[in-house]
Image (tube, rainbow, N blue to C red):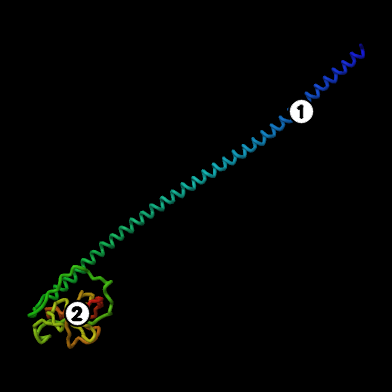
C-alpha cells in the first residue's frame, strides 16, 4: 500500500510539474507574441508619425506653392494691366497719327487745288483747259525721286509764246497749274511729275530757255504771278508709268 501510494504521489508530482511546464511555455509564448505585437505597433506608430510628418511637410510645400502662385498671378495681373495701358496709349497715339495724317491729306489736297486756282487767274489764251479738282493727296509709293529741278513760270501770251492760241507743243490746249515746259530731249510729252510746292504737273510744252534734264517752266495765266514765282529749286518726282 505504501509503495502504491508513493507511486501515485510521484505521478501526481510529475503531472503537476508537466502542468507548470505547459503553463510556463504558454506564458512564454504569450510574452513573445506580446513582444512581437508591441514591436510591430511601435513600427506602425513610427511609420504613421513619419507619414504624418511627410503630409505636414507636403501641406507646407503646397501652401508655399499656393502663395507663390498667387504672387505670380498678382504679377501677371499687374503686367496685363500695364500692357493694357500701353496698348490703350498706343491706340490713342495711332488714332492721333491717323487724324494728323487725314488732316495733312486734306491740307495737301486743298493746297494743290489752291495752286491750280491761283495759276488759273489771269488773262486766258484762246484755247485752254481747266485743271481737274484734286480729290487725293500725293501717293509717294507711286513716285520716283528725280532730284532738285530748277523751275520758272511762264504765261501763254503773245509776248512770251509768239501767239495767244494756247496750244502747247504736245498739240493739246494749255492747262494753267498743270502744264509745264520741259526739254523734250530728256522727257516725252505726257510725262507726269509731282513737284513739291506745285503739285502734280504734266510735260506738255517746250521752250527755247528750257534746256537740260533738271529744268521746267510752269504755266500760269498771270504775268505778275509768274514773276512772283521767279526762279527756284524744287524737289521733283516722276509719276511711275505716267507717259500717255
Q: Are marks 1 and 2 in contact (CB under 8 Å)?
A: no
Drawn side of residue 37 relative to residue 133, left or right? right
> Alpha carbon of mark 1 to alpha carbon of mark 2: how far?
128 Å
Instruction: Choose top left, top right, bottom left or bottom right for residue 49.
Output: top right
Instruction: Choose top left, top right, bottom left or bottom right for residue 42.
Output: top right
Secondary structure of the residue carrying tag 1 is helix
Drawn side of residue 204 relative to residue 52, left or right? left
Q: Nearer the viewer, residue 188 or 154?
A: 188
Foreground disc of the pair 1, 2: 1
- Regarding residue 84, the answer to whether it shows in the image is yes
Local crowd size for mark 1, using a 10 Å CA cut-off: few (<14), some (14–19), many (≥20)? few
Residue shown at 44% from the left, 49% from the top? 73
Residue hosting label 2: 190
Q: Nearer the viewer, residue 134 or 75?
A: 134
Q: Position of residue 147 (x, y in %)?
A: 28, 80
Drawn side of residue 156 relative to residue 29, left or right? left
Residue shown at 33% from the left, 55% from the top? 88
Residue lying furthest bottom in this view? Answer: 208
Q: Position of residue 188 (x, y in %)?
A: 21, 83
Count the marks. 2
- Regarding residue 230, the answer to whether it shows in the image is no
Quarter of the image where the N terminus is located: top right
Quarter of the image where the C terminus is located: bottom left
Which labelled disc corresponds to residue 28? 1
The numbered mark, 1 or 2, whose residue comes first in the sequence reads: 1
Q: Position of residue 211 (x, y in %)?
A: 22, 87
Is residue 24 depicted above or below 193 in this figure? above
Local crowd size for mark 2, using a 10 Å CA cut-off: few (<14), some (14–19), many (≥20)? some
Residue lying furthest left in this view? Answer: 126
Amino acid at each position: 500500500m505504501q509503495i502504491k501510494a508513493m507511486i501515485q504521489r510521484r505521478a501526481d508530482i510529475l503531472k503537476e510539474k508537466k502542468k507548470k511546464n505547459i503553463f510556463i511555455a504558454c506564458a512564454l509564448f504569450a510574452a513573445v507574441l506580446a513582444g512581437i505585437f508591441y514591436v510591430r505597433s511601435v513600427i506602425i506608430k513610427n511609420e504613421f508619425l513619419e507619414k504624418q510628418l511627410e503630409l505636414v511637410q507636403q501641406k507646407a510645400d503646397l501652401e508655399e506653392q499656393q502663395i507663390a502662385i498667387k504672387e505670380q498671378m498678382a504679377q501677371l495681373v499687374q503686367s496685363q494691366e500695364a500692357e493694357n495701358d500701353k496698348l490703350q496709349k498706343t491706340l490713342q497715339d495711332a488714332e492721333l497719327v491717323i487724324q494728323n495724317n487725314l488732316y495733312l491729306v486734306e491740307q495737301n489736297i486743298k493746297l494743290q487745288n489752291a495752286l491750280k486756282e491761283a495759276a488759273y487767274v489771269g488773262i486766258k489764251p484762246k484755247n485752254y483747259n481747266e485743271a481737274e479738282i484734286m480729290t487725293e493727296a500725293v501717293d509717294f509709293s507711286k513716285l520716283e525721286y528725280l532730284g532738285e529741278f530748277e523751275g520758272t513760270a511762264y504765261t501763254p501770251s503773245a509776248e512770251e509764246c509768239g501767239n495767244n492760241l494756247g496750244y502747247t507743243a504736245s498739240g493739246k490746249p494749255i492747262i494753267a497749274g498743270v502744264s509745264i515746259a520741259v526739254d523734250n530731249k530728256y522727257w516725252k510729252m505726257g510725262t507726269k511729275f509731282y513737284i513739291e510746292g506745285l503739285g502734280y504737273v504734266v510735260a506738255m510744252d517746250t521752250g527755247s530757255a528750257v534746256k537740260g534734264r533738271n529744268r521746267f517752266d510752269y504755266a500760269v495765266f498771270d504775268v505778275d504771278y509768274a514773276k512772283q514765282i521767279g526762279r527756284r529749286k524744287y524737289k521733283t518726282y516722276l509719276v511711275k508709268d505716267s507717259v500717255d
